[in-house]
Amino acid sequence: MTLYRNEAVRAGLSLVKKVINANLTPAGLTTTEIYKLVRNEPVSPDFQPPERDYSKTGSQPPHPEHPVRSIRYLKKTLLPMLQGNGLIKMSPVTRTEPVVVQDKKAGKFGAPSSTGQRKVWAWRPLDPNERPKPKIPSPPKRVFGEEVGVGEDWSHLNSRRRRAREGKVAKDAWGLKKELKQ
């Protein structure tokens, strides 16, 4: 199963990247639109799905022979991987679509009368300049007396030993400070 998963992920990611780059629009693509376009793409001849017994009861993927076997697989596995790599991002987009008006008397739907604007969440590719830069952690600050135990955690010690340790470290830090002055 792991081999199938790795192979499916690799083939699925390449298909999704290809579809997103081929259909660049300012409005982006919804998950459903990406899935429909990926389903129309030819599958790589290298991808061979394993022989599985889907005769068991329960829900099965709609297209087990395809690298992107379901919308859920696309949504939960492939798109988050691309988002994590900084290649795509999901953003709200306003789209204009025809609004169908229902005739209340007849109970039928009429022709589109006007266009309405609707907010949709769409996936859009990120420019290389927009990609987030990795955060470089700052080096930890050095504390004076670190060599003798200042700033260490003694929560694992009981109260008697903790008090004794604090006294000893304070004494050693004072001696270190005195030594540096000379």
Image: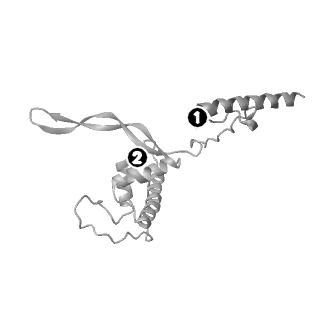
- The local crowd at label 1, few if under 14, some if 14 to 19, many if 20 or more residues have their Cα within 10 Å, is few
Q: Nearer the viewer, residue 163 or 120?
A: 163
Q: In the rendered image, which quarter is residue 164 located in? A: top right
Amino acid at circle 2: Leu
Horizontal side of residue 167 vs 97, given as left or right: right
Horizontal side of residue 161 vs 85, given as left or right: right
**Which secondary structure lies at badge 1?**
loop
The image quadrant where one finds the C terminus is: top right
Q: In the rendered image, which quarter is residue 98 located in? A: top left
Q: Nearer the viewer, residue 165 or 53?
A: 165
Read off the residue under disc 2: 29
Q: Residue at x 20, y 39 (%)?
A: 111
Horizontal side of residue 136 vs 181, given as left or right: left
Using the image, determine if residue 44 lies above or below residue 23.
below
Q: Nearer the viewer, residue 61 or 90?
A: 61
Q: How many marks?
A: 2
Looking at the image, the residue that sits furthest to the right is 182
Read off the residue under disc 1: 158
Q: Position of residue 135 (x, y in %)?
A: 62, 41
How far apart, in angstroms, are the residues tagged by discs 1 and 2? 60 Å
Amino acid at circle 1: Asn
**Which secondary structure lies at badge 2?**
loop
Q: Residue at x 13, y 39 (%)?
A: 108
Horizontal side of residue 10 vs 98, given as left or right: right
The image quadrant where one finds the N terminus is: bottom left
Q: Residue at x 75, y 33 (%)?
A: 145
- The local crowd at label 2, few if under 14, some if 14 to 19, many if 20 or more residues have their Cα within 10 Å, is many
Q: Nearer the viewer, residue 27 or 127?
A: 127
